[in-house]
Image: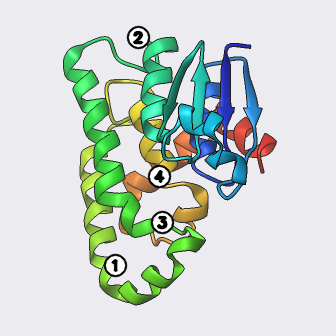
Amino acid sequence: MALKIHGSHQSRTKRVLWMATELGLEFEHDPVAFDDPRLKSPQFLRLNPAGAIPTIEDDGFALSESLAINLYLARRHGLGRLYPAALEDEARVWQWTLWAQVQLEPWIMRDELLLGLRTALGEHTAPLIAAALATLDRALGDRDWLVGERFSVADLNVAAVLSPSRSAHLDLTPFPNVADWLARCYARPAAVETRRRYS
């Protein structure tokens, strides 16, 4: 099997598992946890110098960072389908992926390691979250998807940042376009299967 995905489904690895399932790829899943000592072994550090998950191996190529992995897999296996062929649409895919990581994810993360930081920030994050969701809501407008006329890696990456475990703690009532779009994303068969299989 060419593709190997390292990482517990209880981490950002679930995004990669969703992408691989969306693409219909065969893969081996190594459900290593974020604190497994094996991640600091010389062998693993050759794959990922940070010793972190998720990390993939794909025909001798190693890559880390969940959203980057998804962009790579979509480009390699879903060009013209999940990854747009047009340069302008490719740029929009990158725009939304980077936006989600910088403008949204820092404020909605629920990682246990960041509990103290979340407590210290308190309500200071609420306006930042609202501004990010308002941006996404405006961008969606009357569109079904973020880039082009169909679901793409842009939708998967942003929806993965707004995972059910995170969005359950957000009031999406003022952002109906986001709520509808998120429901469409997570109703996709690959999303349903990934959540069922890796729950």
Q: Comparing marks 3 and 2, which lies closer to the viewer?
A: 3
Q: Choose the circle earlier in sequence order: 4 or 1.
A: 1
Badge 3 amino acid: Met
Q: Choose the circle earlier in sequence order: 3 or 2.
A: 2
Q: Choose the circle earlier in sequence order: 3 or 1.
A: 3
Identify the residue shown where x is 30% and y is 55%.
102
Write down the residue under mark 3.
109
Identify the residue shown where x is 42% and y is 34%.
68
Badge 1 crowding class, 10 Å Cα cut-off, few under 14, some 14 to 19, many 20 or more, is few
Residue 92, position as x, y percentages in the image = 25, 31
Instruction: Give the Cα distance between marks 4 and 1.
Output: 17 Å
Badge 4 crowding class, 10 Å Cα cut-off, few under 14, some 14 to 19, many 20 or more, is many
Q: Choose the circle earlier in sequence order: 4 or 2.
A: 2
Q: Quadrant of residue 43?
A: top right
Residue lying furthest front in this view? 42
Write down the residue under mark 1.
126
Residue 172, position as x, y percentages in the image = 44, 66
Q: Which mark is residue 80?
A: 2
Q: Secondary structure at mark 2?
A: loop
Q: Choose the circle earlier in sequence order: 4 or 3.
A: 3
Badge 2 amino acid: Gly
